[in-house]
Image (tube, helix red, strand yellow):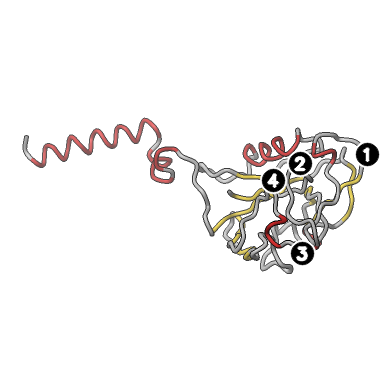
Amino acid sequence: MKPCRLMSLFLTLWISNCMNIGLLEQLETPGGKTVSCGSDCRIFVTSLAHSGGMGGITGADANCNNDPARPQGKTVWKAMIGSTPLRTACTSADCGVGGASENFNWVLRPNTSYKRVDGAFIGNTTGNAIFAFPLQSTFDPSATFVWTGMTGSWQPSGNCTNWSVADSLLVATGDASSLGTIALFSTNSACNSSFRLYCAEQ
């Protein structure tokens, strides 16, 4: 078989195979595997609001991965909420006592660049896998309240019974349009209210 004909046959088979699975998806995520964001990650705010009874941490993560605002691709997203003992950023203020060892099932990476899906640079995390305020850009440019379950220093502050019960208990919510600690803690809100979520790329 002539080299040109062999090359033509190879290209035909390759294109056909890619089209069956989705050429763009193949190029972005070879083999269809989940892709890690490494040291250059994104955060978005869900377009849908949810009560504090989200079906636990698993349900909150599912809300991130099924939200209409979620960018396309094979990336996994997790909800940036506190839920002792299931998900913790810091047990002391800004992890000042134990450093990154205070992280448990935490969704941010240490020493990592984070941006919004529109490309605006939010900031770099510290070695403790948290942001030092003020941020470079807000998590969202519009005033949007989000569940956090954390204080402004990344410590636990209620969690709607680990995000499973929508009752009248009060839990920390943040304002996504703030550059400061208010992004984590603006006020306490009842678990039967509906708010959005911060979702961090994994």
What's the residue type where badge 3 is placed?
A: Val
Mark closest to the chain's N terminus, 2 or 3: 2
Q: Assign the N terminus to one quadrant of the image.
A: top left
What's the residue type where badge 1 is placed?
A: Ser
> Which residue is rendered at x = 49% and y = 46% of the image?
35
What's the residue type where badge 4 is placed?
A: Ala
Residue 158 point in image, percent of width and height: 86, 47
Marks 2 and 3 close (CB-CB < 8 Å): no
Q: Residues within 10 Å of mark 4 (few under 14, many from 20)?
A: many
Q: Residues within 10 Å of mark 3 (few under 14, many from 20)?
A: few
Marks 1 and 4 close (CB-CB < 8 Å): no
Q: CA distance from mark 4 to mark 2?
A: 13 Å
> Which residue is rendered at x = 34% and y = 36% of the image?
18
In the figure, 65 relative to 199: above or below? above
Marks 1 and 3 close (CB-CB < 8 Å): no
Q: CA distance from mark 1 to mark 3?
A: 33 Å
Q: Which residue is denoted by mark 1 in the rendering?
A: 168
In the figure, 69 relative to 127: above or below? above
Foreground mark, 4 or 2, reads 4
Foreground mark, 2 or 3, reads 3
Q: Which residue is denoted by mark 3 in the rendering?
A: 97
Mark closest to the chain's N terminus, 2 or 1: 2
Q: CA distance from mark 4 to mark 3?
A: 25 Å
Q: Which residue is denoted by mark 2 in the rendering?
A: 49
Tag 4's secondary structure?
Answer: strand
